[in-house]
Amino acid sequence: MITINLNGADVQVEEGWTVLDACKFYGIPVPTLCYNDGLTPYGACRLCIVEVGPSENFRIVSSCTYPASEGLMVRTHTKRIIETRKMLIEMLVSLCPQSKTIQDLASKYEVTRVRFKPKYEDCVLCGLCVRMCAEQMDAKAIGFVNRGADRKITTPFDIKSEVCRTCGGCIYICPACQLRCQGPEPPGVLCNSCLNISYPCVDVHNNVMCYMDPCGACLLKEADEKRKESK
Ligand code: FES
């Protein structure tokens, strides 16, 4: 066991834990988006940022990838962290305002305005689908390509992957397409956490985020509609 200082209190944590592991163990809420317990941390969304020391100047790091070490000082809720997290959520909302997961984060962390122009992207490049496919499904059917503004997730050569087993794992875990915000037309990009749940799939099969042809969720939807018609 090692000792770290978490928000002013000395606490014991296991060697090999990340700072996020420590926060979760001691019940300190830290928002996450690209983190999943069953996957390797990737550090893409930066929502889990905390300040670490010791030093005069505490540094901002992503807690899901930062290892806890003896004597580490961690601050999870300083003004700087709270404001930066809110700005990151604003950026995520502007990227993908139709994501219920992101809208819920905005609501939970009291983001009341979005200063960036909405882009209505289908992907926030969190990489959850890539890791899900590689680590849990052992398929590696999708991956990142290009850099900077052209960075995207796709199949090799942008064609249907031969190793894709249409398991739906990528869609299941995707924060941008697993649940679509179906709330009433919001006055802005923030809809304040609607509770409607829709089918976990994007509308169009050949949408870049839907790698399956057709996906299990779409088949379920079709079956459900047929069942309703036959009644
Ligand atoms: S949850 Fe840590 S960077 Fe996304």
Image (tube, rainbow, N blue to C red):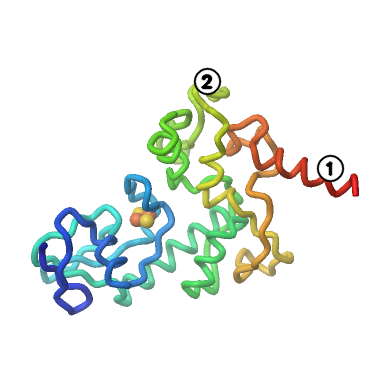
- Residue drawn at (57%, 54%) of the image: 96
How far from the left and from the top, in percent, is residue 107? Answer: 54, 71
Circle 2 residue: 162
Residue 209 in which image quadrant: top right
The answer as to whether callout 2 falls within 8 Å of ligand 1 is no
Q: Mark 2 or mark 1, which is nearer to you?
A: 1
Q: Which mark is residue 117?
A: none
- Residue drawn at (41%, 31%) of the image: 138
* Nearer the observer, 169 or 57: 169
Q: Is residue 205 above or below residue 228?
A: above
- Are circles 2 and 1 on residues that touch, CB within 8 Å? no
Q: Amino acid at mark 1?
A: Lys
How far from the left and from the top, in percent, is residue 97? Answer: 59, 58
Q: Earlier in the sequence, mark 2 or mark 1?
A: 2
Q: Amino acid at mark 2?
A: Glu
Q: Where in the image, quadrant-wise, is ligand 1 located?
A: bottom left
- Residue drawn at (60%, 67%) of the image: 190
In the image: residue 168, left or right of residue 144: right
In the image: residue 179, left or right of residue 230: left
Q: Is residue 8 above or below residue 93?
A: below
Numbered disc 1: secondary structure: helix
In the image: residue 1, left or right of residue 122: left
* Nearer the observer, 64 or 79: 64
Q: Which mark is residue 226?
A: 1
Numbered disc 2: secondary structure: loop
Q: Quadrant of the N terminus?
A: bottom left
